[in-house]
Image (spheres, rainbow, N blue to C red):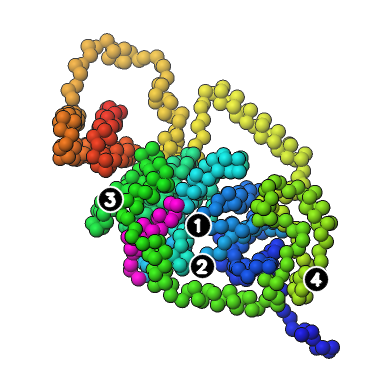
Amino acid sequence: MHPTSGESEPLVEPPRRIAQYTLLLDLARGGMAQVFIAQRDGSREVCVVKKLHAELQAQQAVVRRFHREANLASQLSHPNLARIIDAGFEGRELYIALEYIAGQTLEAIVQALNARQQRLPMEGVVAIAAGVLDALSHAHEAVDAEGTKLNLVHRDLSPRNVMLSYAGEVKLIDFGVARGNVDRYQTEPGVLLGTLRYFSPEQSLGDEVDLRSDLYSLSVLLWELFAGQCLISPATPIQMLSAVHEEEAPLLSTLDPTIPRAIEAVVAAGLAKERDERWQTARELRDALLKAYPMEVSPGEILGPLMTELFPSEEVRFGRMIAEARARLPYDPARMANVPGTISFSDLETRTRTEVLPTQLEQSEEQFPTDPTLANDATKVLSQPPRIIRPVSVALPPPQEKNWIIAGTAMLFVVVTCLVAVFSARIFGIEERLIDTRTRPEEAIEVARPVAREEEAQPKQREETPPEREKKRAPQKAPQAVSPPKKRADTKLARIEAKLEQARDHPDDPDRLAEVHTLIREASAELDGAAKSRIRSLLDKSVRSADIEPAERAFELLKASRRREE
């Protein structure tokens, strides 16, 4: 109803919009983007819109990562992955529209269980893991339109990136820090992306990662769900990174004797520090897990009732909030029509997904001028019609103009400084090693005094004093006898070698191999952290496989470590 003359129209707050989406509710706010519940024009379904923070719009690295998330997600289509609907930008505001999942993150589910002093039932853990592994298998094996493997690695498998719907569906979300062969983008040296507690050993060292890094992270998550506690205790980043690649995970049976040994073996294999000793594919880990603990019913039948028990009224409450947000709108988004000529990422899916050039966008705007009648009653509220939305595949907006004279002068200064540093290093014979202490904390100690270490290794030649010359002419003393500790160490090694020989001669006797394991563990107790961890890892592998070969490798490593100490 229109107001009569003399009456003032009540003030109505304009709804928040981005592109063809009306933003209904604030859902979450992270370090990179803000997340909303939204409704697309012409649709009655709600979705999730992820909008990059305005203060990050000028940071090209962040913008490219946001684009990559949309590009990577658009290559994937699987029931256990959050589906991407649309992506693009309006003006300089970047957004991604995703499938709305009515449910909770695994992090929220664990917190709800902790409040009740409960743990996830074993069949629930297996059901969640099976769903995530199905999603990972699809992502790891994904190919592009030309059939080239994308080699996607999620790199941030943590409880907050696994969702369960209220119906019990498992969804893997957020490929924001994923790596894959979709462009030439690389993480900057020294920058660690992901959740430290769930890093793989190679990820904690800043090394190149592959799909087996995701399998390690998922095994950490499995260990925590079965054990009911954190594997890596919260601490400083350096301490957590050091713990990831040095500390061995305790066997689950030592924490909970009711956990089947078959489950324990599957998780322990996934937590191997060496990637070649882990499960090699998500499909392989999923098959082993389901063989160790078969599911008699579907995941939805296991997880659906659990979600209803933990969150009995949450789905209804949130549905009511969405309905109230819709009721406050001065128009119905479902009756809004998309402006002809608007181009978005989803529109390209029906075409060849070729790059849309800015000139084509301008032509489409001239060919299809905005018709105010399309917006119906919304024209009273919206100050301007939706703008052209460029797809993700379009090149980024050009950066602001720079003063190239200043930039060139600065670059020349840097080059000259580097040349002076190089020539100085050559003149004085100093070799510098640059190591990022954030990614390799253990190496920071090793290179703290490189010059001093070189002087120790190669002492300077100097003229001998008369007392030294006399001492040199004196008859040499007889070699000292082997100290008792070294004798004991040699005796231990000889005993282990004898026991190994007996175990080889009697392969059907597990007690002989177990005795070898015990002796090697005792002998390696005094070694440093890295060597000891490697030996323990080989022994665990020998225990799991009942194979003597890893024990032999552990013994060789023990002997080599002893020789280095001597």
Q: Secondary structure at mark 4?
A: helix
CB within 8 Å, label 4 to label 1: no
Residue at figure coordinates x 29%, y 40% from the top left: 541
From the viewer's perspective, is residue 43 above or below residue 88?
Answer: below
CB within 8 Å, label 4 to label 3: no
Mark 3 crowd level (few <14, some 14–19, many ≥20, 10 Å Cα): some
Mark 2 crowd level (few <14, some 14–19, many ≥20, 10 Å Cα): some
Looking at the rendered structure, the kind of residue marked 4 is Thr
Magenta stretch encompasses residue 54: no
Q: Secondary structure at mark 2?
A: loop
Q: Main secondary structure of the magenta part?
A: helix
Residue at figure coordinates x 58%, y 74% from the top left: 322
Labels 2 and 4: the sequence-earlier one:
2
Q: Nearer the viewer, mark 1 or mark 3?
A: 1
Per the image, the residue denoted by label 3 is: 262
The residue furthest top is: 473
Per the image, the residue denoted by label 1 is: 79
Residue 439 position within the rendered picture, expressed as x and y whole percent measured from the top left: 47, 43
In the image, 20 versus 515, the foreground residue is 20
**The residue stretch that appears in magenta:** 116-134
Residue at figure coordinates x 41%, y 16% from the top left: 462
Per the image, the residue denoted by label 4 is: 373
Residue 520 position within the rendered picture, expressed as x and y whole percent measured from the top left: 22, 37
From the viewer's perspective, is residue 232 above or below residue 450?
Answer: below
